[in-house]
Image (cartoon, grey):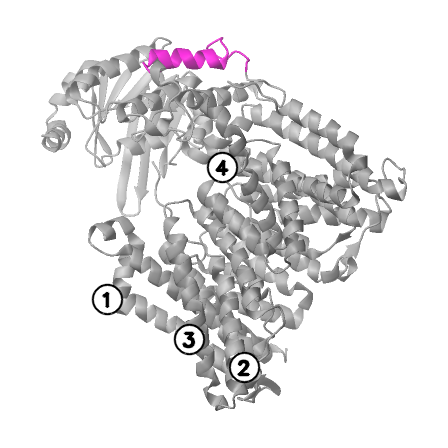
């Protein structure tokens, strides 16, 4: 039972990371009804951009404390052109197609981006430990945890809170909610729906890139980094309810705690439990825990 | 109406392959055998896709079939390729039958995501199961044929002909199924389930049947791949493997039971060729091909072959 | 005449909305019954409950003495209770003929002719001919022969409506529920279409319930009228009596006139 504190601390940290990683996915689905497989690619692009540019920044001897800002700026500057290009050149011509067909298109884009990443950054791993090491560690119940992970938790809260504020308290956000509710009516009322879709895809992709950027210092950045993230983020948003912001938070907490429990008590079931929870939630509430009723058909 | 030449095409292709096979280089035999394995999985996906369903977790049954074949060899000393395929298909069909009660209620994106979750459950279990080699998997002994171990230079050929025979049989069975009144229901389920129900049929049951057939085919394909490659690992259940199968299915289209095997052969060839030419951009070629297909040829490559016939 | 279909005390609520409140109706065999009422009065809910799409919160439905309340739509259809739809429910990727063949295939399969080796050329139960011929006959009867090979997505609205009704014929309905069979059709055409549909259905002897907003059509074809208002049946009588009823005039006829004026 003395493991309980570390189960909680690990669970909270993992939840925060999952929430960050899944936020953009649920935003894009919520607004555009696209299950976006390129989400994992943007996560990887963010991680690579952050790792390579921060390493270059630090190598020139600039103040290490500013490396956190470099992480963020690098991810945004590098990922944004990709997101804009994908939405403008490909996706916007597919909105009339079936949900599953758009999913396949994003899968094709994911395959392409996997190799684009290799062409830009090569296949050798990148390490940037400085932002991680710089902050030292803290103690909970005799266990040491990296303080950087607290930064991740804070970042998750800021992202989630910021997105909620953007959607519910700004004029643009309220219009966006109208677009979600009925794109046709919004278009008829003079709302530039295309612009909202571009903005949403850009924002969702940047959130994925930022999640990758914040994760970069804690891992070695290697090819295939985004592949696992896709399916994990799917699990999180499906559990909470595709397209729901509070759902993503709940899904992240459930998966985070369940995984943490498993790692501490039954490590052989670590991956199994995550997808078992996903399947169980889908079996009982197919539209996730935060979900709306289906409309009547006849 | 055009005369249906599917049976003749399948028969001719099989005879040609069996007769010409010995002159094929070993690597070509390998590519063709793996194409049959993947084609079997894609054939099952075609059945589902005709009813408007995409499974993002067909790797579940592929992997089950492969591990069943592996376990037969490792724990029971069975290496006969037909027994491996039969039992692999049966185990996969049984699992598909059980989870089909749940999955047959789902449509669209939710069918895809639930099948994805189920395949990832198997992946999650296998990577942590040391008795089955965890993430490394394990090797499988070369197969025998009705108790006979062919001479080494004939192993690839005998596996190829066995694969072709099973694939031909599967294609013929599915072709027949598609002509039965319930087999023909697929586009109706895709278009309007309410009407199907109000005509006196159960769309759920029809989907369940298709799911079991697709599962069995994937299981047979997995067992075949296991014995052809000689090695199995948990990546066979990973979502990217399911993605490959969907790729092949989209490439082939749903127009014919022969198409999945042609699609799998094209996929395998592009894969081998592109990987050989440029190991860092082969996925990009695949991705571009898929994107072009989705945008310009949503009915798959097979529609090119039949387009002319339809116009006349 | 014996009662073929008997609904007793059907109630259905959707949250705060009462879609049906103790609806009872005994339908005589081989009769033609008109269902009238404004939109939202509970006519479609009544049809949805009879055919198993909605389960009533209370009450029961019997068909020829058998309780069919718990059955699914497909089981009710197999018993011979068929329906058409307000918005035509067609297979949009298929041709008119293929739409018929899907339905006939299901009928064959339900009769045990759908096995793995079946070629779909067994005689269709109730028709005694192979499905391909039955399809031609039904299409001809509904004046749809010229649209045989057209995709249903490109059909004019009136033709879609007719095909929707023709599709109910594959199972040889004993009771047919038609949800606004003449909606979207010009006033002059309504009579012709109703006549054609009733001729087609009643050639074999069947009970027909139809939802209709045009009181002239109701007076002409219905032997009996069920008037719905606010989830209740407020009149159940011959057309002359029901349409003269002050309640019906206030809640149904007057409102429909106003809505259609």
Q: Quadrant of residue A175?
A: bottom left
Which circle marks residue A171 in the picture?
A: 1
**Chain ID of residue with mark 1:** A
- Give the class, few, some or many, for how many residues have Cα within 10 Å of label 2's Cα (few <14, many ≥20): some
Q: Chain of mark 3?
A: A
Between A209 and B95, the one nearer to me in the picture: A209
Q: CA distance from mark 4 to mark 2?
A: 47 Å
Location of mark 4 (residue) = B299
Where is mark 3, residue-wise?
A157
Q: Position of residue A84 (x, y in %)?
A: 39, 62
Residue found 46% across the figure and 69% down from its top: A209
Q: CA distance from mark 4 to mark 1?
A: 43 Å
Q: Position of residue C164 (x, y in %)?
A: 34, 24
Mark 1 nearby-residue class (10 Å; few <14, some 14–19, many ≥20): few
Per the model, the C-alpha gap separating discs 2 and 3 is 27 Å
Q: Residues within 10 Å of mark 4 (few under 14, many from 20)?
A: some
| Marks 1 and 3 close (CB-CB < 8 Å) | no
Q: Residue at x 57, y 27 (%)?
A: B178
Expressed as whole percent of the image width and height from the top left, the position of residue A268 reads 69, 65
């Amino acid at each position: 039972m003395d493991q309980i504190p570390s189960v909680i601390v690990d669970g909270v940290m993992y939840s925060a990371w999952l929430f960050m990683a899944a936020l953009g996915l649920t935003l894009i689905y919520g607004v555009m009804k696209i299950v976006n497989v390129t989400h994992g690619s943007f996560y990887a692009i963010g991680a690579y951009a952050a790792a390579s540019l921060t390493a270059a920044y630090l190598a020139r001897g600039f103040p290490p404390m500013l490396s956190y800002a470099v992480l963020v700026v690098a991810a945004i500057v590098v990922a944004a052109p990709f997101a804009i290009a994908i939405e403008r050149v490909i996706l916007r011509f597919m909105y009339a197609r079936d949900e599953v067909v758009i999913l396949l298109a994003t899968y094709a884009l994911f395959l392409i981006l996997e190799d684009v990443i290799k062409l830009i950054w090569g296949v050798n791993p990148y390490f940037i430990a400085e932002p991680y090491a710089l902050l030292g560690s803290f103690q909970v119940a005799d266990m040491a945890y990296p303080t950087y992970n607290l930064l991740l938790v804070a970042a998750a809260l800021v992202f989630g809170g910021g997105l909620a504020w953007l959607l519910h308290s700004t004029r643009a956000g309220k219009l966006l909610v109208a677009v979600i509710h009925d794109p046709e009516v919004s278009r008829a009322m003079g709302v530039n729906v295309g612009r909202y879709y571009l903005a949403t895809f850009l924002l969702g992709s940047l959130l994925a890139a930022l999640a990758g950027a914040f994760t970069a210092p804690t891992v070695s950045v290697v090819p295939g980094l985004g592949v696992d993230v896709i399916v994990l983020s799917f699990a999180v948003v499906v559990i909470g309810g595709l397209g729901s912001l509070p759902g993503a938070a709940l899904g992240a907490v459930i998966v985070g705690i369940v995984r943490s429990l498993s790692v501490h008590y039954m490590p052989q079931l670590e991956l199994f439990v995550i997808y078992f929870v996903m399947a169980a939630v889908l079996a009982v509430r197919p539209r996730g825990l935060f979900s709306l009723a289906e409309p009547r058909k006849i | 109406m055009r005369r249906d030449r599917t049976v003749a095409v399948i028969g001719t292709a099989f005879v040609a392959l069996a007769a010409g096979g010995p002159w094929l280089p070993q690597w070509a035999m390998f590519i063709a055998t793996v194409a049959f394995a993947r084609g079997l999985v894609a054939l099952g996906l075609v059945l589902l896709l005709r009813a408007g369903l995409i499974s993002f977790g067909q790797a579940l049954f592929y992997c089950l079939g492969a591990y069943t074949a592996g376990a037969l060899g490792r724990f029971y000393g069975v290496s006969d390729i037909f027994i491996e395929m039969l039992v692999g298909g049966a185990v996969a069909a049984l699992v598909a039958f059980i989870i089909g009660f749940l999955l047959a209620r789902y449509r669209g994106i939710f069918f895809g995501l639930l099948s994805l979750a189920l395949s990832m459950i198997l992946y999650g279990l296998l990577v942590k199961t040391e008795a089955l080699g965890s993430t490394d998997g394990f090797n499988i002994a070369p197969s025998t044929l009705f108790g006979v171990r062919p001479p080494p230079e004939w192993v690839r050929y005998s596996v190829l002909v066995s694969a072709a025979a099973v694939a031909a049989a599967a294609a013929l069975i599915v072709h027949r199924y598609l002509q039965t009144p319930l087999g023909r229901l697929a586009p109706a389920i895709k278009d309007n389930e309410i009407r199907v129900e109000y005509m006196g049929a159960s769309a759920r049951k029809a989907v369940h049947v298709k799911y079991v057939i697709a599962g069995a085919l994937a299981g047979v394909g997995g067992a075949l791949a296991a014995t052809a490659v000689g090695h199995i690992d948990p990546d066979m259940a990973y979502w990217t493997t399911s993605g490959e199968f969907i790729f092949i299915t989209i490439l082939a289209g749903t127009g014919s039971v022969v198409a999945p095997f042609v699609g799998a052969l094209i996929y395998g060839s592009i894969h081998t060729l592109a990987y050989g030419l440029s190991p860092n951009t082969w996925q990009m070629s695949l991705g571009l091909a898929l994107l072009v297909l989705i945008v310009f040829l949503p009915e798959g490559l097979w529609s090119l072959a039949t387009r002319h016939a339809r116009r006349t | 005449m014996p009662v073929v279909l008997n609904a007793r005390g059907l109630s259905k609520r959707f949250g705060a909305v009462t879609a049906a409140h103790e609806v009872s109706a005994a339908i005589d065999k081989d009769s033609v019954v008109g269902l009238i009422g404004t939109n939202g009065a509970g006519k479609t809910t009544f049809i949805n409950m009879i055919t198993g799409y909605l389960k009533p919160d209370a009450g029961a439905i019997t068909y020829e003495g058998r309780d069919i309340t718990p059955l699914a739509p497909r089981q009710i259809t197999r018993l011979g209770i068929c329906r058409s739809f307000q918005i035509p429910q067609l297979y949009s990727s298929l041709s008119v003929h293929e739409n018929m063949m899907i339905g006939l295939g299901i009928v064959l399969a339900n009769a045990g002719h759908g096995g793995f080796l079946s070629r779909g050329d067994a005689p269709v139960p109730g028709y005694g001919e192979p499905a391909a011929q039955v399809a031609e006959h039904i299409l001809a009867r509904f004046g749809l022969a010229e649209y045989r090979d057209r995709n249903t997505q490109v059909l004019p609205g009136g033709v879609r409506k007719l095909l929707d009704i023709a599709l109910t014929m594959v199972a040889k309905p004993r009771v047919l529920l038609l949800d606004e069979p003449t909606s979207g059709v010009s006033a002059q055409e309504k009579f012709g279409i109703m006549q054609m549909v009733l001729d087609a259905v009643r050639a074999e002897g069947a009970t027909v319930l139809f939802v209709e907003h045009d009181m002239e059509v109701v007076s002409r074809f219905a032997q009996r009228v069920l008037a719905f208002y606010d989830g209740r049946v407020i009149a159940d009588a011959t057309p002359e009596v029901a349409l003269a009823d002050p309640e019906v005039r206030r809640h149904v006829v007057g409102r429909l006139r106003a809505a259609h004026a």
